[in-house]
Structure formats: structure tokens, C-alpha cells
């Protein structure tokens, strides 16, 4: 083969690969732009528990523990648990609405904690552990109100539901060590005695909604 022909072939291959690479990059960019995510913010007791549960749901992209509903700006965890800031421990959930609906997340929310327990969940006591939904738009407010009304009318619980519905204003992320707390501290006594039983119950009830294991 002539040297000229050899380099001409290499040039064609290089250009072709460049076009393919560019097309792949453009397609991936378009797909990322096309995917629209939504946000849900729930307070259901200790945010370690709430994060661990919602992070297992198919369609949930990210769960971040933090604080909402108080008056202090950028509160620390110690300030919140002192009950001086007015914040609730919450999980801020980013999800793909084409894979999981807000209604489905509401169902998980109400079935994985006690919504009749005022300012406490089990041994966790304080206003920071209150049951609360921070709705992000009118659609979420309408769905949460409808679900709450239906639950109250159903008489499933002997005591009245005390879950609060509040308009979302601001979310403050908790300190980094709270992120993925259950996954990072599986041998912690709180995780073993409180979170693990909740997860086991959740996975039994919602087995069809769990994220698929990566092959």
C-alpha cells in the first residue's frame, strides 16, 4: 500500500471516529437536558431513616438529609436538636417523575412512619422529628391534601393524623457526615435497632418499587 493511501485511510478513520464521538456526546447531552426531575421534601422522624428508605426506590436519583421549616439560617445539627431553630429533620428527594410519581412517594412516606405521633418517632422526641410535608407547588399541595383527607376518613389509625403540610421555602443541607449515614455505619446501634427493622418492613411492603441491583 502506498504511504499516501495509508495516511488517507487513517485520516478517514480519524474523522469518522470524531463524528461518532461528537454525535454520542451530543446525544448524551440532549438526553440529560430532556430528563426533567422533580423534588419532594419530607420530614418523617430521624432523617437517617428517611434517607435510607427513599434512597432504595426506583426512580429516586438523590436523597439529601437536611433541615426545613425553621427560622434560623444555615442551622447546625446541634442547633436543630436543641429545638431552638424551629426546623424539622427532612429528606430532600430528587426523583424522575417518569419512573416514580409523587403520589407513590407520598404512599411510602405515610406507610414508613407513624403520622399520628406528635413531635416524635419512637424514642426520638422533639419538634425536629415532626411529621411534615413541604410541598413545592400547587400540584404537590393538592395531592398531599387529597391523600391526607382520604387517610383521615379511612380510620386506619385510631388516633388523628398530625402530619403538617407546609409550603416549601428553603432547605439547608446537614453536615456531610449525615449523608448516607446508614450505609456508612451499618454496625451503629441506632442503625441496627431502629433503621434496619424499618428498611426490612419497607422492602417487604414495597418490593416492587425497589431499585434493581446493578449487574
Image (spheres, rainbow, N blue to C red):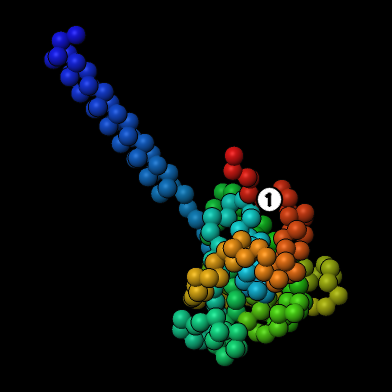
Q: Quadrant of the N terminus?
A: top left
Counting from the top left corner in percent of width and height, residue 24 is at 36, 36
Looking at the image, residue 146 lies above or below residue 37? below
Q: Residue at x 54, y 77 (%)?
A: 68
Q: Residues within 10 Å of mark 1 (few under 14, many from 20)?
A: some
Q: Quadrant of the C terminus?
A: top right
- Which residue has dot 1 on it? 209
Q: Is residue 132 left or right of residue 20?
A: right
Secondary structure at numbered mark 1: helix
Counting from the top left corner in percent of width and height, residue 74 is at 46, 81
Q: Is residue 17 left or right of residue 37?
A: left
Instruction: Judge by depth and name the residue closer to the eye, 18 or 36.
Output: 18
Farthest left residue in view: 4
Q: Residue at x 73, y 69 (%)?
A: 194
Farthest top residue in view: 1
Q: Residue at x 27, y 32 (%)?
A: 18
Counting from the top left corner in percent of width and height, residue 52 is at 64, 62
Rendered image quadrant of residue 186: bottom right
Instruction: Judge by depth and name the residue closer to the eye, 36 or 138.
Output: 36
Rendered image quadrant of residue 65: bottom right
Residue 102 shows in the view: no
Q: Residue at x 32, y 34 (%)?
A: 21
Residue 159 shows in the view: yes
Q: How many marks?
A: 1
Amino acid at each position: 500500500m502506498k504511504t499516501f493511501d495509508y495516511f488517507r485511510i487513517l485520516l478517514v478513520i480519524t474523522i469518522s471516529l470524531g463524528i461518532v464521538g461528537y454525535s454520542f456526546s451530543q446525544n448524551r447531552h440532549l438526553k440529560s437536558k430532556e430528563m426533567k426531575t422533580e423534588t419532594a421534601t419530607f420530614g418523617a422522624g430521624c432523617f437517617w431513616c428517611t434517607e435510607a428508605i427513599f434512597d432504595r426506590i426506583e426512580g429516586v436519583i438523590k436523597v439529601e438529609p437536611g433541615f426545613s421549616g425553621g427560622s434560623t439560617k444555615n442551622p447546625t445539627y446541634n442547633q436543630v436538636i436543641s429545638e431552638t431553630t424551629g426546623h424539622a429533620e427532612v429528606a430532600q428527594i430528587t426523583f424522575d417523575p417518569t419512573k416514580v410519581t409523587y403520589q407513590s412517594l407520598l404512599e411510602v412516606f405515610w406507610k414508613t412512619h407513624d403520622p399520628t405521633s406528635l413531635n416524635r418517632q419512637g424514642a426520638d422526641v422533639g419538634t425536629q422529628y415532626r411529621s411534615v410535608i413541604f410541598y413545592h407547588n400547587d400540584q404537590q399541595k393538592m395531592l398531599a391534601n387529597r391523600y391526607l383527607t382520604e387517610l383521615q376518613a379511612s380510620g386506619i389509625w385510631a388516633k388523628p393524623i398530625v402530619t403538617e403540610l407546609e409550603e416549601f421555602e428553603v432547605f439547608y443541607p446537614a453536615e456531610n457526615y449525615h449523608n448516607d449515614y446508614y450505609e456508612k455505619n451499618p454496625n451503629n446501634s441506632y442503625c441496627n435497632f431502629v433503621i434496619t427493622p424499618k428498611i426490612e418492613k419497607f422492602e417487604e411492603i414495597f418490593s416492587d418499587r425497589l431499585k434493581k441491583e446493578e449487574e
